[in-house]
Image (cartoon, rainbow, N blue to C red):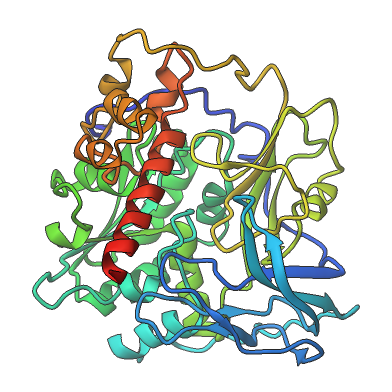
Amino acid sequence: MELKTFRGGIHPPYKKEATAGKATVKSSVPGEVVIPVQQHVGAPNTPTVKVGDRVEAGQKIGSSEAFISAPVHSSVSGTVKAIEERPNFTGAPTNSIVITADASQPDKWAEKKDVSGLSPEQIREVAKEAGLVGLGGAAFPTFVKLTPPKDKPIDTVIINGCECEPFLTCDHRLMMERPDDLIAGLKLMMKVVGAQRGIIGVEANKMDAIDLLTSKVSGEPGIEVVALEVKYPEGAEKMLIEAVTGRRVPPQKLPSEVSVLVQNVGTAIALYEAAALGKPVVERVLTVTGPCIKEPKNLVVKVGTPISHVIEQCGGLVGTPVKIIMGGPMTGWAQKDLTASVVKGTSGILALDAATVDMNAEQRCVGCDQCLDACPMFLTPNLIVKSARLGKWEEADKYGARDCFECGACSYVCPSKIPHVAYVRKSKAELAAASEVKGGA
């Protein structure tokens, strides 16, 4: 079997064995959920409820009139206890809606309806009203991605089933457990954008998913499964497009520039759920694992569930964790406060020990250029860091700060343990702040 891939990248140990074969199970509902009103890239939402209001699971509780936005919904039935700033997964105080959950939570989304008659406009509206965002972690509003510029027709929809981050297996489990819903979601996306070709890209360390999906799409016109080399970051949008189609997205351009739409496995299934069940994004599957998790699992978790509650569902912590991460080890966020809650883009919670995490301090760059060799975007991470250290943000941008999608390959290979991604994030924040100042001048 010929495996497709891209230039560059790295081969970290994947450490998926603890959960790859474990079916997803439902987490219990916490007594209280904390739902940040901003869980997407784009304009902030405004709460549409007030303290003391009774809310039902699936009820919209925050929205915006802006085009690039996605509403949030209550993940539980209960009572609004507070609307206040709480720390989110980045540690930043974020306007959040705190809801006390009822003891009993009804199953509201059990009856499926036929979606074959939905028009492209209706499917887009479904995605918008469901608050659907990229569930792989990017959290970009799906409605916007399903509305490409009229002068950028889409001919190919790619479903990202790579799940190339170490430890994470939630997408693998979704492919194994819900292949029909995944394919149904892909078909809806193809219909929306008028694409004739649909591709599900899966890394070759998930041959069971490749075989199952290949059998499922047999006879489906225009849909195929493509096996990809096991390499990080194979699942990054631009890398995946290059590997599967041979097309290269230009710097600071979107996939629509090369007539492609990319969506995550979980996003495709969530779109189908929204269309067939009327279910908004109120829960998601995530992987809870690492050497300091007593019973690693793939869990279905309500949005707004505190990290501490999720860990309790897996038997709690064992040993001495030196780092707890929301997301994957390459792109996730280290957590200081376990009251921070699961959001739409949360793909995992990892509890890592000293043997797993390199705690060595950052050293001086030795000029080895390994970061350049590893970068899949042909950037110069070493020069971005150098510019950022000097506070030369425009210079950092010239070297590719805003083109970087923060995969962390550069940091992984760096013998000096330089946290390149931290410097990139700082550069982006400073560039965005400068842009806002110019815009308001």
For this view, does 25 lie left or right of residue 365? right
Residue 62 lies, in percent from the top left, at 58, 82
User: Quick one: quadrant of the C terminus?
Assistant: bottom left
Residue 49 lies, in percent from the top left, at 68, 89
For image coordinates 14% across by 45% down, the residue present is: 248
- The answer to whether residue 206 is seen in the rendering is yes
Instruction: Give the answer, above or below, for where 158 lies relative to 192.
Output: above
Q: Nearer the viewer, residue 297 or 372?
A: 372
Q: Nearer the viewer, residue 158 or 302?
A: 302
Work out which residue is located at the far right of the displayed protein and give it.
Answer: 103
For this view, does 58 lie left or right of residue 146? right
For this view, does 167 lie left or right of residue 304? left
Work out which residue is located at the far front of the displayed protein and give it.
Answer: 441
- The answer to whether residue 119 is seen in the rendering is no
- In the rendered picture of this protein, how many numbered marks are placed on residues? 0
For this view, does 139 lie left or right of residue 356? left
Q: Quadrant of residue 278?
A: bottom right
Instruction: Give the answer, above or below, for where 25 lies relative to 51.
Output: above
Residue 409 lies, in percent from the top left, at 39, 28
Residue 124 lies, in percent from the top left, at 35, 83
